[in-house]
Image (cartoon, coloured by chain):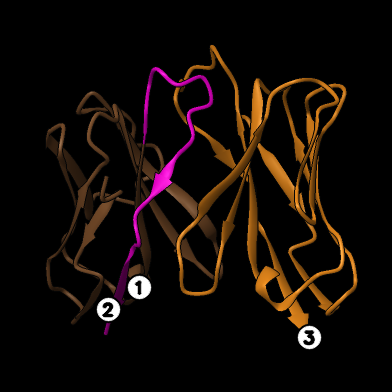
Chain colours: A brown, B orange
Amino acid sequence: DAGVIQSPRHEVTEMGQEVTLRCKPISGHDYLFWYRQTMMRGLELLIYFNNNVPIDDSGMPEDRFSAKMPNASFSTLKIQPSEPRDSAVYFCASSLAGAFDKTQYFGPGTRLLVL
Amino acid sequence: GQQVMQIPQYQHVQEGEDFTTYCNSSTTLSNIQWYKQRPGGHPVFLIQLVKSGEVKKQKRLTFQFGEAKKNSSLHITATQTTDVGTYFCAGYKHGSSNTGKLIFGQGTTLQVKP
């Protein structure tokens, strides 16, 4: 298996632009998680899905952030409009609902810089 | 809400010294997991502890789960430069309102001086 795939790996954009991050979870995994990591705030859970349905979006910073999961093999995290404080590494992770341990498998991340 | 606290935040050691990071949960956990993130990388699963008082070893790494299943520790014996990175604990609780979600600690970043 290729593992969790994220694209792009790096993104540099200007303030006010729309940014779309993409994630393909491991095939067969039921849960998909979006995290944001910064030096100041550490690893933060933004939102997670179970069987394509958003379960908890309480970590989404504000209305500028939105996430979708149109099918079991694809999810997007969109920031519109982007701001410099959104600069961070965004990780997608997936796990198997039927597994007792709920081990999460992380993608390589998207490094976002908003100028 | 459920919280997992991890200390210390940073640790600098000389190569060959031991290192320990501690994890404490505000509630009893069903299991606890440990992840390692190398600089510039992503968190990678290391191990899971399930039973009260459980101890597991991976070479120079020793993981413990407390008797009350609310705390855990990771101990590295004789650190090497390859141990550099951030170590996260993550707690899971069955039957919680947000089933499927892990609660991550803040992580301990380990620096090893050669």
Q: Chain of mark 2?
A: A
Mark 1 → mark 3, Cα distance in angstroms: 30 Å
Image point 19% across, 28% down: which residue? A52
Q: Where B110 falls versus B101 (above or below)? A: below
Left or right side of A71 for A43:
right
Q: Nearer the viewer, residue B67 or B96?
A: B67
Q: Where A23 falls versus B53 (above or below)? A: below
Amino acid on which the number 3 mark rests in the picture: Lys
Q: Residues within 10 Å of mark 3 (few under 14, many from 20)?
A: some
Q: Where B30 falls versus B21 (above or below)? A: above
Q: Are marks 1 and 3 on the same chain?
A: no
Taking the view exactly as shown, the residue that stands out farthest to the front is B59
Where residue A5 appears, as percent x and y from the top left, is: 24, 54
Q: Which residue is mark 2?
A: A114
Q: Which residue is mark 1?
A: A87
The quadrant of the image that shows the C terminus of chain B is: bottom right
Left or right side of B5 for B105:
left
Image point 63% across, 52% down: which residue? B88
Taking the view exactly as shown, the residue that stands out farthest to the left is A70
- Check contact, mark 1 vs mark 2: CB within 8 A: yes
Mark 1 → mark 2, Cα distance in angstroms: 5 Å
Could you say whether the residue bearing mark 2 is in a helix, strand or loop? strand
Using the rendered image of the protein, determine whether residue A13 is visible from the camera's viewpoint: yes
Amino acid on which the number 2 mark rests in the picture: Val
What span is in magenta?
A95-115
Amino acid on which the number 1 mark rests in the picture: Ser
Q: Which residue is mark 3?
A: B113
